[in-house]
Image: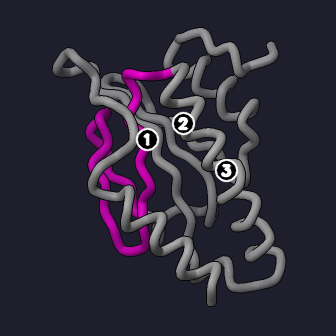
Amino acid sequence: MLRLLLLTTLIAANVGVGFAQRASRPGKARVAVAFFDDERLQHPAGREALQYFEFYFLQIHEIVKRDFPNVELRILGPGELLHLPNGTNLNVQNMRQEIGYVLSASGKKSRVLTGVQTEADFACAAANFFQQRSPSCPK
């Protein structure tokens, strides 16, 4: 119950605000969306995955702020619909995977990172997708 309260507070504090600045030029919007479906994560392995997700999310937030200042990091909560920069929509309940990230930019097909992502995994995927260098990616 305490974990659910912590997660709800984290979502409520960040849903409307986002974490990073929006892109400076119109038409060049970039977004990284963290998503999880709490209803489908009610089994023991799902609870454990959610714990790891929360742990790495804090580190990923710092990476996005530092290495990708033109990317907005969002958390998509249950029942929310998010319009992505590439013109598609994202709804957690319609996702095949119950936890992960979606990277989206105008003019590009979205990339879905499924499951728990470490900070290095995320940094390398984001660097590749957004075509930017990240010191957090060891490759």
- Amino acid at the residue labelled 2: Arg
Mark 2 = which residue?
111
Q: Is residue 56 above or below residue 126?
A: below
Q: How is the image coloured?
A: one colour
Which residues are drawn in magenta? 68-91
Image quarter of residue 135:
top right
Q: 109 or 120: which is nearer to us?
A: 120
Residue contact between numbered discs 1 and 2, judged by CB atoms under 8 Å: no
The residue mark sitting in front, 1 or 2, is 1
Cα distance, mark 1 to mark 2?
Answer: 14 Å
Residue ranking furthest to the left: 26
Image quarter of residue 19:
top left
- Crowd rating for badge 1 (residues with CA inside 10 Å; few <14, some 14–19, many 20+): many
Element at label 2: strand
Mark 3 = which residue?
114
Q: Is residue 71 above or below residue 37?
A: above
* 57 on left or right of 139: left
Mark 1 = which residue?
73
Task: Specify which label sits upstream in the sequence, 1 or 2.
Answer: 1
- Amino acid at the residue labelled 3: Thr
